[in-house]
Image (cartoon, coloured by chain):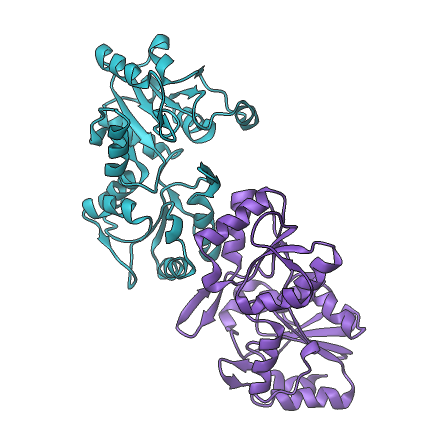
Chain colours: A cyan, B purple
Amino acid sequence: MKIGAVLIDIDGVLYVGDRRIEGADRALRELDRRGIPYRFVSNTTRRSRRSVSGRLQGLGYAIPEPWIITAPVAAAAHLREGGRTRCFLLTTPDARRDFEEAGLVIVEGGAADAVVVADAAGGFTYASMNRAFRLLVDGADLVALEKDRYWMGPDGLMLSAGPFVAALEYATGKAAEVIGKPSPAFFHRALREIGASPNEAAMVGDDIVTDIGGARACGMKGILVRTGKYREETVRQSGITPDLVIDSLADLPDHL
Amino acid sequence: MKIGAVLIDIDGVLYVGDRRIEGADRALRELDRRGIPYRFVSNTTRRSRRSVSGRLQGLGYAIPEPWIITAPVAAAAHLREGGRTRCFLLTTPDARRDFEEAGLVIVEGGAADAVVVADAAGGFTYASMNRAFRLLVDGADLVALEKDRYWMGPDGLMLSAGPFVAALEYATGKAAEVIGKPSPAFFHRALREIGASPNEAAMVGDDIVTDIGGARACGMKGILVRTGKYREETVRQSGITPDLVIDSLADLPDHL
């Protein structure tokens, strides 16, 4: 497979829980050695980029923070570029940092250009949802960092941002603009940073829909790893065919 | 208009806020005098039937409590009739009483036959939504007391149960069973209590969709009042034509 650039998912690809994926770091160094540029793209919306970076450092990865493209960071840049600077956030306090550092004005009410919905966890309350709803009725745009249904937490399934986005869509009749994977703009933003075009790039991830389906829909190759949330049955049911399936990121250099 | 039985909405028809609709009580006594049976049907899901009844008494209405059919009461009866006795409730503590008094088993986790969603107000939290979600994934049915989008509160629009029902539908892929208006079963339940058939009955309400549209869809006449949430524009946009529009419930006897 001839690949000139690689985008790599984080959770389930570099680590699972507190465990580093064996050989992943060696694979990244091999990409460096061959001069193949890469970036990391993640739908994790509970954490700021700084926290994601800190976690990777703690696991022994030496990855420059700007190489990590998360949905909050992409959303903050996207909103700033579009002049939608007054944002009401349904996010965790940690993810909020990405919006503050991008210079956006975080509003609690009054008027907003955008209502931004991440996986706010305990930040989803009747009061916060109602405040978001009123701002949307008053004209704010609905911006979803992701529309995932759920993820696997330490003690069972956990609701992601998607259901709360769906609630606000139902209440207002407005369709959300989705920022994270599988939005093509999210992949394009990451590719732009390394000057690569989709047709020379591959996305490596453990989610058949957002990683592989999303990548293929915008012209990239999709390489599925058998780590993280990978389940053979889920892949079969998805109707999506990866360009390549590998046991883990460690095997990537062998196929390039 | 020849009408043998009447169903009457409560909020916006008998009162608006803390103000009784003038002449409404006189109209009810006139129905009594003519021997036209009537019952009250309400989508209010924050309050137990006892609270609704107490409120009406406080406003000077002498309405027997069993004549008030609310979505929580109908849901509790419906679940008991179907043998779905283990219920997880997303309701206010007040509405919870209707389920306890119906002899249902209120569960907090473990296993449930049904996840029941009312307008839980502050009871909607990430934790309670996630618990509901896990029970649904484990096989519980999704039962919505109503799927209204919002209502007009004292200081602005307030989310109703609908958006939170939509969130759980999105998360699980399950469609909710809706109990309150405009569900035909809800109207039929009220009509059964007075031994009336839909084609001889009329529904009087201020909501063009749930009251008038719902009534007409199940063969009843729909009589819209110009009190409560009535807005000429909303009626026009709805595409629903009431059989009759009257200024308030006070005018009903003149048209029967």
Give above or below for A201 relative to B103. Answer: above
Residue A82: name its quadrant: top left
User: In the displayed image of the protein, which residue is found farthest to the top?
Assistant: A254
Q: Is residue B215 left or right of residue A186?
A: right
The residue closer to the viewer here, B201 or A98, is: A98
* Residue B197 in sight here: yes
User: Is residue A207 placed above or below A168 in the rendered structure?
Assistant: above
Q: Position of residue A217 (x, y in %)?
A: 42, 27
Q: Is residue A90 left or right of residue A239?
A: left
Asked whether the viewer can see residue A1, the reply is no
Locate residue A254 relative to residue B139 in the image: left or right. left
- State the image coordinates of residue A15 (x, y, percent, origin top left): 36, 26
Residue drawn at (50%, 73%) of the image: B231
The percent coordinates of residue A54 (x first, y second) are: 24, 34
The answer to which of A250 and A85 lies nearer the viewer is A250
Could you say which quadrant of the image residue B186 lies in?
bottom right
- Quadrant of the drawing holding the N terminus of chain B: bottom right
Number of numbered discs visible in the structure rendering:
0
Give the residue displayed 46% in from the left and 54% down from the top: A173
